[in-house]
Image (tube, coloured by chain):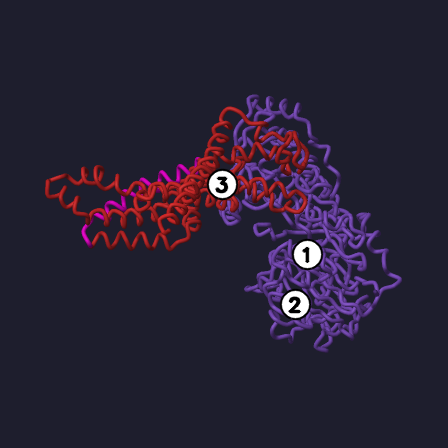
Chain colours: A red, B purple
Amino acid sequence: MSGQVETAAARPRLSRRSLTLNIGLFLVGMHVTVALLTLVWTPYDPTGMTGGRLEAPSWAHWAGTDRLGRDLFTQIMIGSRIALIVGFGAVAIAATIGVTLGVLSAFATRYLDDILAAAFDILIAFPTLLLAMLVVAATESASLFSATLALGIAISAIVARLTRILAKRILSMDYITAARTAGASWPSIVFRHLLPNIWPMLAVNFALQFGLAVIAEASLSYLGLGAPPPNASWGRLLQEAQGTVYTAPFGAIAPGIALVTLVIGMNLLADGLREAGDPTRRGRQ
Amino acid sequence: MTASLKETGLGFRSLTITVAFALWGATGAMAQDNADPSAVIRVGSLYEPQNLDNTAGAGQGINEAFNGNVYEGLFQLTDDGDVVAKLASGFEMSEDGLTYTFTLQPDVTFHSGDPLTAADVKSSIERVTAEGSQSSRKRTLANIESIEAKDDNTVVVTLKERSISLPYNLSYVWIVNDAAKDLTSGEDGTGPYKLDNWRRGSSITLSPYENYWGEKPKNGGVTFSYFKEATALNNALLTGAVDIITSVQSPDSLMQFQDNPSFVVTDGQSTTKEVLAYNDRVAPFDNVKVRKAVARAIDRKRLLNSIWGEYGTLIGSFVPPTDPWYVDLNDVDAYDPESAKALLAEAGYADGFTFTLDTPNYDPHPIVAQFLQNELAKVGIKVNINIITANEWYTKIYQAHDFQATLQEHVNHRDIVFYGNPNFYWGYNNPQVVELIASAEASGSEAERDEKLTEANRIIAEDAASGWLYLYPQIVVSTASVSGYPVNGLNSQFFAYDIAKQAR
């Protein structure tokens, strides 16, 4: 009896797991495809004032037009590209800084480790957006690069702390002690033993942070601190649509949908990766 | 509005020129017959004052609530831009223009019961010019050499230099009882209303002053209710929580009122100008031809429509129609991209050029910047948009003059004088204009002053000293049952005493 129940329960879990991953892959893949497409083709010139003021969605303008008569669908497509650039860029910066510092901290003497750990905690205590605003303010002017850098630095503390904890656990394992006893150099331990073992957990976290970076970039652009106009960041589109939300709600809804689908896609992808990569579940498949 | 220039230099106004406002008549005529004299008018506003003293940094909200309602000046700036005598019953100017003798209205009392005397007037003007005063009028009144209370009813003001605009400048000075103590949270004025109650963060209630010297208000009191943001304000009007909202910041929120017979939308003329300010000191904007080319390359009609829909006014210079020296200069550099290209070629920029437009990060500047970027690209000029905060604007542009071009809204009435100051942030320096503006203030008559400033106005337009993109509308929305309110809101004033509300 109990065996039967377990089998029945295991099946839906299996299909649900792949469904999560598949939906995530589909949503993210859709945005990646659109972003790549914008490099060679968009329905309209993104800055061209091709329509009337605040036109409703139609066959000519799928998401309507903004106050200047620019095609919103084109701008949202470009927005995908900006969101992905910032997302990938920020996560890459965060991974480089965060993983390096996290591993360093795990290897360091107790004294240095304590200082680094405290520094990570302090940085994490700052809201990501606030930290990013500080970095943007410190650079000469707001740009796509400054926004990406700012978010990368803000996220790196989170990555560093996670890396440190994961690395410490691995470093206390018997096989590391064995490797050390056998005279393995520290680069060899880091690259052959440590990173391959913490990589799956880090990858899941990167996917999650990617989604958060996309939202944070939209928030920065909403505040006028992201990529400067006419870069069609979704945050900027939302900000511009704010005043016309009663008369032209599509101006806010369309970029909102784009933002939500990419972030949900990244989160589902992260969930799917976690479930697929979780060694405690692997046996049940 | 945070970075708006609140400072006005010398200002002037003819008593004779009147400007027609079609809508004034329309709203003024309705609902008079059935008016309820005891009705309390509920006004919704976004501008709660910080305190109740206009010399202590109270903000524009205090002008809205108190000017003409609670406090009065020797003179009053009316809603259509005229200066009329209020607490002064008359005045005489000496031959040399340096001595003004003001006679006060008789039988005026403060809300505390004290009679108005010349000593009150003297102390009230000195409050504005005092060391610690934060009044935006401090600088214009610095021209006063001395004030003397000749007798209880006569005040003599002596000036350092001739100033034909003294009555206009005095319209900004509240006459306050010199015995009054706490003016930041209380009042003692001579106006038709006295302060009933101030609930911080929420409302100011005014009730009629029974011993008012002039005509009684047409209503039984006013409540100014304060809101944090525009949507809440609009909803308050929709749900009947307020009768009038004082300024609407976007045309798109008007849809809910426009086609509804329960509401009246009035489209007045503000004094707020959206300006593309070049740094006239640096290349390429030191070249008149380049500035004219830029002006001709911009379809301002389309821009105004993008931002304000059906509302707003195109102006061909810095002067709005409520200033006495207004002339229609829209045709000086009308939209003409072909001649813009020709002018650029003549100026040596046949292949165009690139410049950075420092753009404040709040509406409407970013969207205006994108429009300009688009339009100027068509004549070969590349615009890089650099988004900055209001604070950066103040330090980088207003103080350090470190910019090529910027966008800013200039809110003041009678502010053409900025073009007579070569050290102003935009660095426009035409000796002829400097001379005209300086000598206008020393004119012997208002007609002479107006003639000089009209001439200065024409020259700055010919020089395309800046790009004057459009004049903001001043939109007031009310329920159909109230009438008689000001539509232009000059200097944020909102006179409430003529508002009548229909009995239900």
Report which residue position mark 1 lands on.
Answer: B235
Q: Earlier in the sequence, mark 3 or mark 2?
A: 2
Crowd band around label 3 with a 10 angstrom C-alpha radius: few (<14), some (14–19), many (20+): some
- Residue at 56%, 28% in the rendered image: B381
Which residues make up the magenta segment? A85-110
Q: Residue furthest left?
A: A182
- Return the mark for residue B402: 3
Q: Main secondary structure of the magenta part?
A: helix
Question: Which residue bears the numbered disc 2?
Answer: B124
Residue nearest the viewer, comparing A26 with B350? A26
Q: Amino acid at mark 3?
A: Asp
The mark that comes first in sequence, 1 or 2, is 2
Please tell me which residue lies in front, B496 or B345.
Answer: B496
Name above or below for residue B297 compared with residue A54. above
Callout 3: residue from which chain? B
Seen at 55% across and 25% down, the residue is: B352
Task: Indicate the amino acid at tag 1.
Answer: Asn
Give the CA separation, mark 3 to mark 1: 43 Å
